[in-house]
């Protein structure tokens, strides 16, 4: 499968990561509210009068059971202020490793909105490898979590990629 990368404009053969440019919490803000937020490709802070919300960009890997590659998602998790600041301060430190608790903060299609929001995660930081990886906390009866642990088919992965590229 060939696809044209929206970042570099070149064609690639491997599957693209299905990336979300911002956390859902940021995307839902009004233009006026976004003036009190800071967002980059790796960090987001939403500053409100009573609280500041912190987010980091991470990778969620979805196993594809009948293919030789997996499907990657570039998603966001909310983390504590302490975790955010520690990760931010060590962002360029290639030997930095840490594990944080986070909450998934994107709606991942084709799953229902309620299925995706507020799923607890372990955020595994290993700066030698790049962006942190997340591992979803298991919860019974959740389709996203079932697929995360049991895998999806290549046909389903390609359908997700095609749907995302057509947006």
Image (cartoon, rainbow, N blue to C red):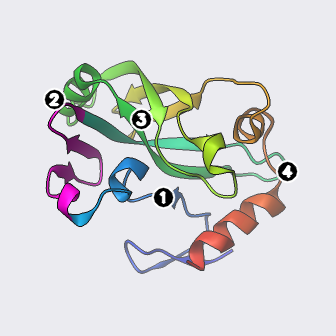
- Residues under labels 1 and 4: Cα distance? 23 Å
Question: At which x and y percent is residue 56?
Answer: 34, 39
- Residues under labels 3 and 2: Cα distance? 15 Å
Labelled disc at residue 19: 1
Whether label 2 touches label 4, CB < 8 Å: no
Q: Name which residue lies at 74% across and 35% down.
A: 142
Q: Is residue 92 left or right of residue 120?
A: left
* Closest to the observer, 103 or 62: 103
Q: Residues within 10 Å of mark 4 (few under 14, many from 20)?
A: few
Instruction: Quickly name the residue at label 4.
Output: 66
Instruction: Quickly name the residue at label 3.
Output: 132
Instruction: Quickly name the residue at label 2.
Output: 89
Q: Residues within 10 Å of mark 3 (few under 14, many from 20)?
A: many
Lower sequence index among marks 3 and 4: 4
Question: At which x and y percent is residue 166?
Answer: 60, 80
- Which quarter of the figure is the N terminus placed in? bottom right
Q: Is residue 70 left or right of residue 45?
A: right
Q: Is residue 97 left or right of residue 121?
A: left
Q: Residues within 10 Å of mark 2 (few under 14, many from 20)?
A: few
Question: At which x and y percent is residue 108?
Answer: 59, 52
Q: Is residue 27 left or right of residue 59?
A: left
Q: Name which residue lies at 61% across and 64% down.
A: 14
Q: Mark 1 falls on what kind of element? A: strand
């Amino acid at each position: 499968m060939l696809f044209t990368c929206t970042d570099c404009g070149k064609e690639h053969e491997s599957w693209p990561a299905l990336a979300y440019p911002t956390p859902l919490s940021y995307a839902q803000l009004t233009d006026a509210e976004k003036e009190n937020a800071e967002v980059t490709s790796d960090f987001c802070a939403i500053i409100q009068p009573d609280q500041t919300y912190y987010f980091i960009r991470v990778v969620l890997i979805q196993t594809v059971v009948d293919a030789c590659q997996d499907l990657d998602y570039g998603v966001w998790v909310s983390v504590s202020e302490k975790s955010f600041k520690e990760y931010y301060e060590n962002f360029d430190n290639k030997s930095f490793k840490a594990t944080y608790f986070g909450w998934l903060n994107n709606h991942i299609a084709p799953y229902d909105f309620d299925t995706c929001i507020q799923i607890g995660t372990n955020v595994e930081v290993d700066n030698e490898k790049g962006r942190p990886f997340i591992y979803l906390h298991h919860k019974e009866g959740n389709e996203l979590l079932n697929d995360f642990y049991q895998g999806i088919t290549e046909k389903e992965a390609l359908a997700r990629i095609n749907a995302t590229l057509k947006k």
